Amino acid sequence: MPIAQTSSIPSFLYGTAWKEDRTAALTELALRSGFRAIDTANQRKHYFEAAVGQGLAAAYAAGIVTRADLFLQTKFTYQEGQDHRLPYDPAATLSVQVAQSMASSLEHLGTDHVDSFVLHGPASHSQWTTADFETWQAMIKERDAGRTRLLGVSNISLAQLQQMARAHAEPPAFIQNRCYARLGWDREVRAFCREHNIIYQGFSLLTANQQVLRHPTIAALAVEMNATPAQIIFAFARQIGMLPLTGTSSAEHMKQDLASLSRELPREAVNTIEALAG
Ligand SMILES: NC(=O)c1ccc[n+]([C@@H]2O[C@H](COP(=O)([O-])OP(=O)(O)OC[C@H]3O[C@@H](n4cnc5c(N)ncnc54)[C@H](OP(=O)(O)O)[C@@H]3O)[C@@H](O)[C@H]2O)c1
């Protein structure tokens, strides 16, 4: 059975969004299936982080993994992205909100540190603002205090990344973006990441690219390689240097997604898929 990682940087992330009452059981199942990296957020609107912690605890109790085997990633989400179930005092400064959100995440996940702490998205759609500056500085403080190993930022454009790079001495370790094939699989942001030694995490690789998934080129490759179209997409993502996410709720798809790690597409096929839609 393929294992998604044991080193410090994983090769596949299991995403826990939108699982509600099934979150704990699916987190445990993902670990039983071989995932070793979990993505969550302290954003109750879309994630049930405390239940992720219950799933982890069940896996520890069953002897499937220990904390040391795992890569745990969570996020700080601004109030605009939350509902009423906030993990911080909305009247507090952003720096305090970041610290409170982190403390709450550590409690939810039953750990004294996470491996990656991600800003869920900049405060504005077009700029890296002073709010983002304050938030990022507070996240660096969390990292320096040992509560996270690494930092990341999500839902960010190339222009915002460039502004961020000018504003801060330190680039993020991760970018996490929705990856559209029609944008050359986020080509510009991926190029920035390559230049700055940032790991690009791609989500919605299947759901945002349904047409590509049904494309005759992918279908033919899938038949040729005795794989599923989803496996072709995940293998492609890995081969172009991406760290993919899957949030499957199916035990069978968990196995298939992990098995895609050992698929090697011919270079020509990788180039064709990269140019397929944009
Ligand atoms: N930073 C952000 O703002 C943000 C936003 C969205 C998501 N995320 C993260 O990314 C994770 C993944 O989200 P996502 O948007 O990529 O969608 P997703 O929740 O992973 O949905 C994937 C879809 O693909 C299907 N699927 C997965 N593996 C498959 C396979 N091998 N064959 C066929 N179908 C397969 C799943 O169906 P089955 O369940 O039936 O397999 C599901 O319908 C989330 O859980 C979250 O952690 C982050």
Image (cartoon, rainbow, N blue to C red):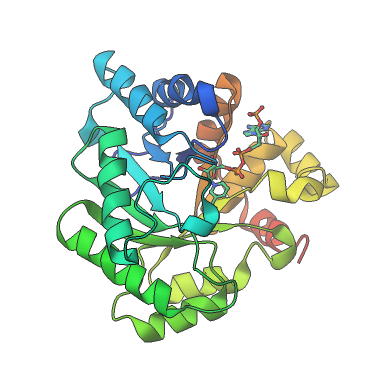
Instruction: Name the outermost residue toward the right.
Output: 216
Q: Residue 107: which quarter of the image?
A: top left
Q: Quadrant of the C terminus?
A: bottom right
Place of residue 186 in the rendered image (x, y in percent of width and height, measured from the top left): 62, 65
Tell me if 129 is positioned left or right of 137 in this view: right
Q: Quadrant of the N terminus?
A: top left
Place of residue 235 in the rendered image (x, y in percent of width and height, measured from the top left): 58, 45
Name the residue nearer the viewer: 61 or 138.
138
Q: Which residue is drawn at the image coordinates 50% and 33% (left, top)?
A: 258
Place of residue 16 in the rendered image (x, y in percent of width and height, measured from the top left): 49, 35
Tell me if 93 is positioned left or right of 243 in this view: left
Q: Which residue is drawn at the image coordinates 55% and 80% (left, top)?
A: 159
Q: Residue 228: which quarter of the image?
A: top right
Place of residue 250 in the rendered image (x, y in percent of width and height, measured from the top left): 59, 23
Instruction: Name the outermost residue toward the front.
Output: 91
Q: Is residue 108 above or below residue 268?
A: above
Q: Residue 39: which quarter of the image?
A: top left
Q: How many marks?
A: 0
Q: Is residue 249 above or below residue 68?
A: above
Whether residue 241 is visible here, answered yes or no, is: no
Instruction: Name the outermost residue toward the top.
Output: 62
Q: Which residue is drawn at the image coordinates 38% and 39% (left, top)?
A: 37
Whether residue 210 is visible here, answered yes or no, is: yes
Instruction: Name the outermost residue toward the bottom.
Output: 166
Q: Is residue 15 above or below residue 60?
A: below
Which of the four quarters of the rendered structure image does ligand 1 lie in? top right
